[in-house]
Image (tube, rainbow, N blue to C red):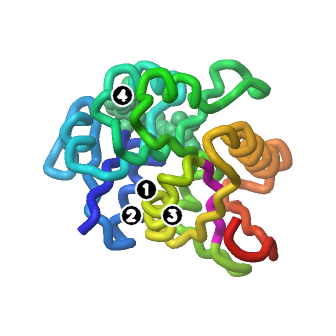
Amino acid sequence: MERVAVIGAGAVGDALAGALRRGGLDVAVGVRTPAGPAETTVADAIAGAGAVVVAIPGAAVEAFAAEHGPALAGRVVLDASNDLSGGHDGPMHHMDAWASQAPGALVCRAFNTIGHENVSAPGFPDGVADLFWCGPEAARARAERLIAATGMRPVRVGGPEAAGVLDGVARLWFTLAFTQGRGRRLAFRMLGGGGEA
Ligand SMILES: NC(=O)c1ccc[n+]([C@@H]2O[C@H](COP(=O)([O-])OP(=O)(O)OC[C@H]3O[C@@H](n4cnc5c(N)ncnc54)[C@H](OP(=O)(O)O)[C@@H]3O)[C@@H](O)[C@H]2O)c1
């Protein structure tokens, strides 16, 4: 069974670990202070996994990449974090830090564009949510298998350089959910668009 590490056991980490397990993957949850049999250290979780989902506060990502960068070499990293410390207009991603601190990792942005409730329950009366993601072509098979395991349809919007587009999708979600008051039970679906991009 394919092993996936989920780093962080907060709202997003919990939602993703549950969704990936229901999708048939072997999930190791890596946390700083393991508690109970379902959790392990970050280092152990990474060591046994081909893909690593990062669900920690955005402000912690740079230090995380520096500490674990060497161990992440050759692995697919799906960074779900959003860093709002620079305000709502600046980048919410850390692709520059990933590139410098974890140059051997295949770093993608995924699961950052919708609230965690929708990861837990991607089905809506009007269809199943799509999950926009970006990352290197070499990560595609593993990244899309993992996203599909959560029940969502993966839609790749580009390589790592498209991280700003994913920030924009997250901002659209914030605007609809909070500014407009539509609520957190909200996700996206691409209509049409042809086949594989
Ligand atoms: N909430 C959402 O709906 C949502 C949706 C999309 C994306 N996001 C983004 O996803 C990330 C996680 O959000 P969340 O709502 O799950 O946050 P959360 O509930 O606060 O959980 C954060 C988790 O990260 C761990 N953590 C904190 N600092 C860490 C570090 N330096 N190294 C390793 N683990 C660390 C925390 O564990 P300990 O502090 O106990 O060690 C905790 O398990 C954030 O960047 C957020 O912007 C959130």
| Residue at the spot 74% in from the left edge and 48% down from the top edge | 169
Q: Please name which of the two marks, 2 or 4, marks the residue nearer to the observer.
A: 4
In this picture, which residue range is highlighted in magenta?
129-134
Query: Which of the two labelled residues, at mark 3 and mark 4, occupies the earlier sequence position?
Result: 4
Residue neighbourhood size for the residue with mark 2, other residues' Cα within 10 Å, grouped as few (<14), some (14–19), many (≥20): many
Q: Which residue is mark 2?
A: 20
> Which amino acid type corresponds to the residue marked 1 in the rendered image?
Leu
Residue neighbourhood size for the residue with mark 1, other residues' Cα within 10 Å, grouped as few (<14), some (14–19), many (≥20): many
Between the C-alphas of marks 3 and 1, the distance is 14 Å
**Pointer 4 with pointer 1, Cβ within 8 A:** no
- In this view, the residue in front, 70 or 9, is 70
**Pointer 1 with pointer 2, Cβ within 8 A:** yes
| Residue at the spot 33% in from the left edge and 21% down from the top edge | 67
Magenta-drawn stretch contains 133 = yes
> Which amino acid type corresponds to the residue marked 2 in the rendered image?
Leu
Q: Tag on residue 16?
A: 1
Among the 4 quarters of the image, the one containing residue 184: bottom right
Position in image of residue 81 (x %, y %): 54, 37
Residue 32 appears in the figure: yes
Among the 4 quarters of the image, the one containing residue 24: bottom left
Q: Main secondary structure of the magenta part?
A: strand
Query: Which of the two labelled residues, at mark 2 and mark 3, occupies the earlier sequence position?
Result: 2
**11 sits to left or right of 134:** left
**Pointer 2 with pointer 4, Cβ within 8 A:** no
Q: Which residue is mark 3?
A: 144
Q: Which residue is mark 4?
A: 69
